[in-house]
Amino acid sequence: MLSLGAMGKAGGGAGDYYLNLAREDYYLKGGEPRGQWRGDGAARLGLPGPVERSCRRAVLSGYHPAAGQPLVPQAGPQHRVGWDLTLDYQVFSC
């Protein structure tokens, strides 16, 4: 089953879930690996290599991480951070 949910607004701390993932110790206390910027969008924004916390916060708020310019008309505290898609499946045994 696929569930789709709108994440909260940037000003309400909705992006903090993703910003704090690296602190979680799951899967044998390995934590979340450090993110890497990838793809054409990252290249156009000048985001090579590892994801820095300040850059990720700016992007989740709708701003260019280096220039500070709005990337979307609703940039700022009221910007919707994104959409959360979760695929849930069940394994049945006989």
Image (spheres, helix red, strand yellow):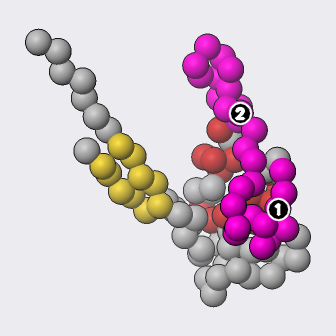
Determine the residue located farthest toward the left in the rendered image: 94
Magenta stretch: includes residue 30: yes
**Does dot 1 land on a helix, a strand or a loop?**
loop
Please state the horizontal and vertical placement of residue 19, each as a whole percent of the image. 69, 47
Please state the horizontal and vertical placement of residue 68, each as a whole percent of the image. 84, 76
Q: Residue at x 63, y 55 (%)?
A: 15
**Does dot 2 land on a helix, a strand or a loop?**
loop
Chain-order first, disc 1 or disc 2 = 2
Kindly identify which residue carries mark 2.
33
- Circles 1 and 2 in contact, beta carbons < 8 Å: no
**The C terminus, quarter of image:** top left
Res 45 → quadrant: bottom right
Amino acid, disc 2: Pro
- Badge 2: residue crowd in 10 Å (few <14, some 14–19, many ≥20): few
- Direction from residue 56 to residue 52 in the image, left or right: right
Query: What range is drawn magenta here?
Result: 22-49
- Badge 1: residue crowd in 10 Å (few <14, some 14–19, many ≥20): many
Q: Residue at x 36, y 56 (%)?
A: 4
Determine the residue located farthest toward the right in the rendered image: 66
- Direction from residue 84 to residue 49 in the image, left or right: right
Please state the horizontal and vertical placement of residue 72, each as a whole percent of the image. 65, 82
Kindly identify which residue carries mark 1.
47
- The front one of 16 and 2 is 2
Q: CA distance from mark 1 to mark 2?
A: 18 Å
Question: Is 66 drawn above or below residue 93 in the view shown?
Answer: below
Question: Is 16 drawn above or below residue 69 in the view shown?
Answer: above
The numbered dot on residue 29 is none
